[in-house]
Each structure stands twice: as C-alpha cells, then as structure tokens.
Amino acid sequence: MAQTKKKTAALPPKKQLLDMYLKMSQTRLFEENAARLFSLGRVHGTAHFCIGEEAAAIGVTATLHPDDLIYATHRGHGQSIGKGMDIGRMMAEFLGKATGFCKGKGGCMHIADMAKGNLGANGIVGAQFPIAVGAALSMRLQKIDRVVVCFCGDGSTNEGTFHEALNLASIWKLPVLFVCVNNQYGMSMHVNDAMNIPDLSIRAQAYGMKGWSVDGNDVMAVWQAAVEGRAYVEKNGPGFLVANTYRIMGHSKSDGNKYRDKTVIESWKERCPIKIMRTWLLKEKLATEAELVAVEEQAKKSIEDALAFAEASPEPELESALTDVYAD
Amino acid sequence: MREITYAQAICEAMSEEMRRDPKVFFMGEDVGAYGGAFGVSAGMLNEFGKERVRDTPISEAAIMGAAVGAAMTGMRPIIEIMFSDFISCCFDGLCNQAAKTRYMFGGQTTMPIVVRAPAGSGTGAAGQHSQSPEAWICNMPGLKVVVPSTPYDAKGLIKAAIRDNNAVVVLEQKLLYRVKGDVPEGDYIVPLGEAAIRREGKDVTIVTYGRMVARCLEAAEQAKEAGIDVEVIDLRTLVPLDKHAVIASAMKTGRVIIVHEACKTGGFGGELAAVITESEAFNYMDAPILRICGADVPIPYNPKLEASIVPTTPVILDGIKKVME
C-alpha cells in the first residue's frame, strides 16, 4: 500500500511518549488476559482482540484533547484504554459484573464511557459512522469545539453506512476524523478480495475529503498523521486516516485462522508495534532501558489490579435485567 | 376554537417546541426548501434557518444514525422518514442503535429522538409507499410508538414525543394530513400512553387507532340504528399501551372488535387480543375477540383493489352485528 510521506511534526514530550508505550503495553496485556479468561469460560459470548494493532489505536488517542469524542470498534479495547477509560471497569464489564461500565449488560462488544467521551463500541459493523457524524453535528449546533474520532476497520468500509456517513459529514463539513484500522481482514475475507482499490485511503477522494495512509505498526507514524489529521479536521471538515496493520489473532476467539498462511502471521509478529516503539525509544535515546522496564512493570501491575478489581466485583442483581430500557 | 389541518398541527408542534428549546432540531429529505413531501414543514426553514432545519441527501441510514449520535450528545433531533415503508432503510439505526443503546450501555445515555413518518394506504402509491408498519416497531423494547388520528392529538402527541427522553416513532396518517379539526393555540400536550374513548357505549368495544378511527365511529353510528351501543377506543399510543382503558372497556361490554389498517398476521391486533384474554376481562367475554384488519398483502396500485384490502365502514358494521350474535 502507498504510504503518505509526512513532514515530521515536533515529537511529543517524553512523558507522553512513555504514556503511549504504557498504554500499548496495557492494551497487549489486557487482550492476553481477556483471551485467557475467555478460554476459561469466564468471558461470555465472543471477544475480538486487537493484538498487533495497538499502535493504530494509541497513536491516534494520544493526539486527542480530553474533551474529544471517540466511537470505538468491537475490537477497540486499545482505543478505550487510549481514551483513558478505567481498565478495572472494562475488565469488570468483560466479566459481566455490576461494576462494569455497562452494569454487565453490554459486555466486550459494547463498552462505552460517556463521561470519558467514548460514545461506545458497536456490535453492528458500520453502525458507528452515522452516529459519529451525528455527534459532530451535535457539537456544531451547540457551538462546542470538539473533534469526533470514528474508529473503524477495513471491512466496515464496504457497509452502506460508511458511504452515507462520509458523504453527509463532507457536505456538512463536520469535524469527524474517520480512522480506519486496516488489519487486512473483515472476518475471513482479505481486504484485496473485498475491494477493488489498491489503497483504502483513496476512498476519501470519493467524498471530497482528505485522506492519509500510514504504517499502522509504527506508533509514531500513526501519531504524526493523527496530529495532522486532527488539526485539519478541526478547521476544515472530515478526514479519513488509514492505519495499515495486520490482525494477529483470529476474528474472534472461536476463529482458528484456517484461511490464513501461518508464516504470514509469524512475519507480522516480528513487526510488533510495541517492540518497534521500544527499539526506537532506546535507539533515539529518548528513554533508558530502566525507564522502559519500569513502564512495563507499571503496565503489568495495572492489569493485575484491574483483574483483582473485576474478580472481586459483585454480579448484578437479577432485577437489573429489566432496568435502563427507557429513560424517565 | 380555531380549526387547522392535521399537517398544520404537526408543523405547529415542531415549531413551538423548537422555539421553546434550542436543543430541538429537525432533519430529513426535502423538509426544508421544499417544505416536506406532504407540506408538513412549510415555513419552518424560513423561521429557524438551515442549521436547525436541515435538508439531507437521500440517506436514511445516515439520517437515523446521525439522530442517534446527536441525541446521545445533548441534542433533541426530530427526523422525518419520507414514507413509513422506508423505515426498513434505516432499521439498524432505529432498532439496533436507538432502541438498544441505553440498555446496552447500562443507562449511560438517553435517546431523545422523534422519528416522524407518513404511513398508510389510499393514495395510490402502491406497495412500497403505503404500509402501516407499526408491528415491526412495537416489538422493539426501547422505542415508543404513537399514531395520531386527529389534528388535536397530532399536535399534542408530537409535543409530548419531543419532550420524551426516548426514541418515539410517530406514524402519521397521510390521508389525514388535509383533515381539519379543533386545535388550541399555544402549549398543551397529549401524554403518551393514554387512550381516548371517542364514543361511550355498553354493548361492544372497538379498539382502534389512526385512519380507522373515523370508520369505526361511522359504523358505531349506523349500529345505533340497529339498537347496538358501541364504544370506540382510540389508542393514540401503541407503546406504551393503555392496557387499563382497553381491559376496563372489555370488562364493561364483553364483546371486543380490534380494527387496524395494517395487515392482520403478526399485526398489533394480535397483541391487543392477548392483552385482553390474559386479563380479568377474560371472565367477562361473551364472544370471541374479532380482528378486522388489512389483508395480508402488499398494497396494490389499482384504487378499487387498494380500497378493498383495508377495513371499510360496512365491514366494521357487519363485525359489530356478528359479535352480538
């Protein structure tokens, strides 16, 4: 895929760089633990993991203002962590506990934290596009300066809602940055079979909006594109940023990956975005080995604490199954 | 009291609420410059401007989804879906998103949306522009459904719907748009969930709504000559249903007819019949509940065919006599 050449923006301060490294590490550990709990039968239904796609999430969320809104994907646990959501309450929601963000009524696919500006994750592929557009319209009508980041995957760009929503955002010049995490697979269909274009980002042109295409495993490349994307969108109207990456695990926990070449998966594991950032930070002398180990320990502890909180949390009362259908 | 049309009453409801609350805005296809496919929103673009009265491209899924996003973030959108049949074009946004979001997110959000859609047959628009799709929507927890039958109710129900913090679908009756009726000036609401007894009677209860109310009242007048005293209940709201009014009337008369334009199978009438038989009214029933509904067909084009497949006054009168046997 064509990669956009970027002018180098000034690097974020060290504190933010280490925070990005922390959040990518937390995302990886969160996913690995959730996968483990799923195998033990503790997490119900299905779960979709973003292992290998951490940079595509954190590179974007690191550029957002605290008041910006996001709409996450069903594979968006990294997007949620990046937005600053409480990891313990995320894990509690996975375990269906009353302390989860959705009181145990949403589960892994429907995590939302309205207070932190995460409008939710959606179990319907593509449903997020017009909802994000509506949120941006809402900000415009209330004269609130805010950007809405709408995460999506490559597969979702073939849903009708993608086209309707991008068109609407474009004609109304709404501040939505559509961020496509192109992990190359819908469920089992490879992106080259699903589309007849060589580079997803050219879909932006069909809607008169600016597009970017970046290496989604390089968190700093994602970050630079997102900085430019957010600044552009704030002033001009919608944009479409494609972060090209690869899905390491199957679509969901029940997916045995039979439709993929295992050597391809292994080669992408070598391009682990967390390893790439670690190597870069050391090489550029932006952090020391000791500092990075400390961040890794912090990540490990935070996930342990989250697990402990979730395990200790109570189940919801049965009566809660009947509440929250209607508002007063 | 002054008389205005059903369409004017709806316009007044939307306009008064938009003057009252800056969070309310309105979008849909051809609602602005054109004034709405049925002329309902004539004048609104002039008064409120194009930020708050928004013409959209032909994009029902985007319109509905955008209403969800706006409602979740502090606004109170009204959207118009040009024909109720097109609700299927944005079914995900209505049912998987608007209806379910509050629950799935554990109560973190409200969904103050009004979805207005002209419904019903009789205009020769045929299969895809004539449906009464309320049954699809009534089976979706999280949504409310109203069907106004008079200009008074249209204004009052829509004002109540706009103030409701949930997604309310208003199935307007397109053949009633030009019908006039008494409508007070200024603010009043018709609460959701309250049926109206249009005609009191002691022998037979007819439960109905929408365009069929007038036919039921005609048939009730004619039944008077046969010495049958018919009570006509206009539900006005389907969800939440005024079960109390329906059950009380069934207990009073012991004979119930359900009349709706929508086709019979899987129609809302089945729900009503079950509500009655499950209740204490069962012990008072002197006849099986009779449903007089639309035929199980899409709406045909030819005007005689079109008229033949929905309940008519003579058919309703026959039904009244039948339950009295």
Image (cartoon, rainbow, N blue to C red):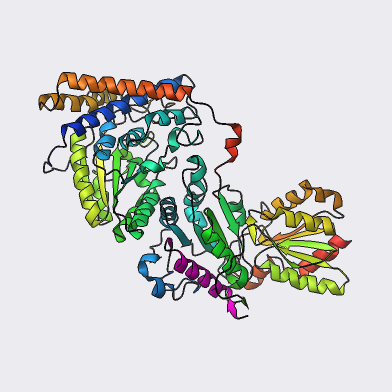
Give residue A275's position: percent from left, percent from top: 21, 24
Q: In this orientation, does residue B119 appear?
A: no
Give residue A35's position: percent from left, percent from top: 40, 23
Taking the image as shown, residue A268 lies to the left or right of residue B316, namely left
Name which quarter of the figure residue B233 lies in. bottom right
Q: In this orientation, does residue A241 appear?
A: yes
Q: Residue at x 51, y 59 (%)?
A: B114
Closer to us: A109 or A104: A104
Q: Residue at x 42, y 21 (%)?
A: A308
User: Is B136 contained in the magenta span?
Assistant: no
Q: Residue at x 19, y 43 (%)?
A: A225
* Magenta segment: B1-30
Residue B224 vertical position relative to residue A200 in the rendered view, above or below: below
Q: Report the number of discs.
A: 0
Closer to us: B155 or B133: B155
Taking the image as shown, residue B1 lies to the left or right of residue B129, namely right
User: Is B10 contained in the magenta span?
Assistant: yes
Taking the image as shown, residue B81 lies to the left or right of residue B298, namely left
Name which quarter of the figure residue B258 lies in. bottom right
* Quarter of the N terminus of chain B within the rendering: bottom right
Residue A57 vertical position relative to residue B216 in the rendered view, above or below: above
Give residue B247's position: percent from left, percent from top: 77, 54
Taking the image as shown, residue B126 lies to the left or right of residue A125, namely right
Give residue A204's position: percent from left, percent from top: 26, 51
Residue A220 vertical position relative to residue A262 in the rendered view, above or below: below
* Quarter of the C terminus of chain B within the rendering: bottom right
Q: Residue at x 42, y 60 (%)?
A: B23
